[in-house]
Image (tube, helix red, strand yellow):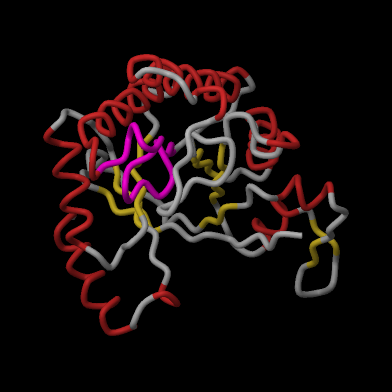
Amino acid sequence: MRNFLLTCVLLVATAMAAQTEEPFWLGADISGTTELEAYGVKLYNNKGEIRENTALMKELGLNAIRLRVWVNPRGGFSSKEDVLEMAKRAKYYDMAIMIDFHYSDWWADPGKQPIPAAWQYFSYGEMQYALAAHTRETLQLLKDNHIDVRWVQVGNETTHGFLWPMGRAEENMEQYAGLTEAGYKAVKSVYPDATVIVHLDAGCDPQRYDFIFDGLKKYGAHWDMIGISVYPFWDVEAKLTKDYKETIKAFT
């Protein structure tokens, strides 16, 4: 069975419009919870007591969770209905919610950003429409069930764009920007106050961030916050520290 890792995401604000002080958000991605439960996996706290995952996160001091959304996933895990189930649990424990749209039927990451099977033959215009519709439908389902969404990622680790090859940043920056903008507008149409995030990994590579965000800006895409994933075990500590500080300085 696949191992499920909690992914920490460092969020760097590009603009601070609110004057009130934000709480410190400590969260984790627990999207695999319902699949673990389906396999009969049980989770325990440090006293050896069985806990449901959301309850365990709350017990450990977390106040936010991230939930990924896949378009047509096998088994239904990380579908919009599955996300609703997990969001209800988060609401019960008074945890803030981040929704992470992969725009794929399975994992999307820097090494792969596959187009959902049902969207394979779409034109660019059709892809924008499908992306926006999927975003709106998922968020509207949450809103109709009285779920508050604080943050929304338009894409997951889009270090080289998403929905390849159409939205691959190196070859099709304008289309990547247009798809990102379609997602941004869809989010705001349902949750006007939600913070829209463009999320990359390679937090130790400021040149990559320059390339992506200069390109998005050039072609008219909008975002509210930059999401940075940093994986120290893939980098040399000294380089990570130096480049991470440069990235923070450049985008705050």
Query: Hey, which quadrant is residue 130 in on the image?
Result: top left
Q: Residue at x 58, y 42 (%)?
A: 106
Query: Where 103 falls versus 48 (above or below)?
Result: above
Is the stretch drawn in magenta largely helix, strand or loop?
loop
Question: In which quadrant of the rendered image does the N terminus lie?
Answer: bottom right
User: Between residues 103 and 245, which one lies in front from this camera angle?
Assistant: 103
User: Between residues 6 and 22, which one lies in front from this camera angle?
Assistant: 6
Give residue 201's position: percent from left, percent from top: 37, 57
Q: Is residue 37 left or right of residue 251?
A: right
Give residue 242's position: percent from left, percent from top: 21, 77
Q: Residue at x 72, y 34 (%)?
A: 76
Give residue 239's position: percent from left, percent from top: 26, 80
Q: Is residue 154 left or right of residue 105?
A: left
Q: Does the magenta segment cover residue 154? A: yes
Give residue 125's position: percent from left, percent from top: 33, 15
Query: Where 71 falls versus 27 (above or below)?
Result: above
- For the record, the magenta segment spans 151-169
Question: In which quadrant of the rendered image does the C terminus lie?
Answer: bottom left
Q: Residue at x 66, y 31 (%)?
A: 84
Q: Does the magenta segment cover residue 113? A: no
